[in-house]
Image (cartoon, rainbow, N blue to C red):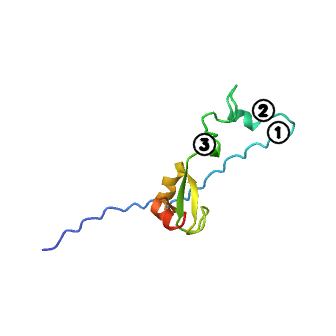
Amino acid sequence: MARKATPEAPTVSAPPAQPVVPVAAPPSPAPNSGGDDHGANAAATTQGQDPIDPQVSTDAPETRKWVKALVLHDSIYGKCGEVREFDAEQVSALKIVGYIDPHPKAVEIAGG
C-alpha cells in the first residue's frame, strides 16, 4: 500500500535581525562662563535648599566606629597579611567579597 503524499506546510523565515544601535544622549550644556551660576546646577537643586544633601552624614572620623581586620590579599585595602582599621559599616561587605577577615583571632595571629 502506498502512502499518500501530503503537501508540506511552507516554512516562513524571519527577516535577519537588525543590530540595535544605541542613540547617543545629547551633550550636557557647558557651564556658563558669564559668572551666572543658574546654569546646569540650578536644575539639580530645588528652590531654597542647599545643594548639599542634609541627609548625608558628615560625621568626623573620630565619631565613626573602626574595626581592625586582616587584609587577605593585595588590593586597594592593603597588602596581604597587614592588619588595618576599617569603617565598621563597610566591614561586613568587605568580608563577604573576601578582602578582609575581621575575626579577632585572625587579627591577633597576624600581630595586630
Residue farthest along the top direction in this orientation:
48
Kind of element beneath mark 1:
loop
Q: CA distance from mark 1 to mark 2?
A: 8 Å
Of badges 1 and 3, nearer the viewer stands 3
Q: Amino acid at mark 1?
A: Asn
Disc 1 designates what residue? 32
Disc 3 designates what residue? 63
Which numbered disc flags the more N-terminal residue, 1 or 3? 1
Q: Amino acid at mark 3?
A: Thr
Determine which of the numbered discs, if any, sits on residue 23 in the image: none
Query: Residue 101: image x %, image y %?
Result: 49, 61
The reply to whether the C-beta atoms of the residues labelled 1 and 2 are less than 8 Å apart is yes
Residue farthest along the right direction in this orientation:
34
Q: Amino acid at mark 2?
A: His
Left or right: 69 as drawn, with respect to 3:
right
Kind of element beneath mark 3:
helix
Q: Is residue 44 above or below residue 79?
A: above
Quarter of the image holding residue 38? top right
Picture quarter with the N terminus: bottom left
Left or right: 23 as drawn, with respect to 17:
right
Quarter of the image holding residue 47? top right
Tell me what residue is drawn at x 44 percent, y 59 percent.
Answer: 14
The reply to whether the C-beta atoms of the residues labelled 3 and 2 are less than 8 Å apart is no
Query: Residue 108: image x %, image y %?
Result: 50, 64
Q: Is residue 10 above or below residue 45?
A: below
Query: Residue 19: image x %, image y %?
Result: 56, 59
The crowd level at tag 1 (other Cα within 10 Å; few <14, some 14-19, many 20+) is few
Kind of element beneath mark 2:
loop
Disc 2 designates what residue? 38
Tell me what residue is drawn at x 63 percent, y 33 percent.
Answer: 54
Which numbered disc flags the more N-terminal residue, 3 or 2? 2
Q: CA distance from mark 1 to mark 3?
A: 40 Å
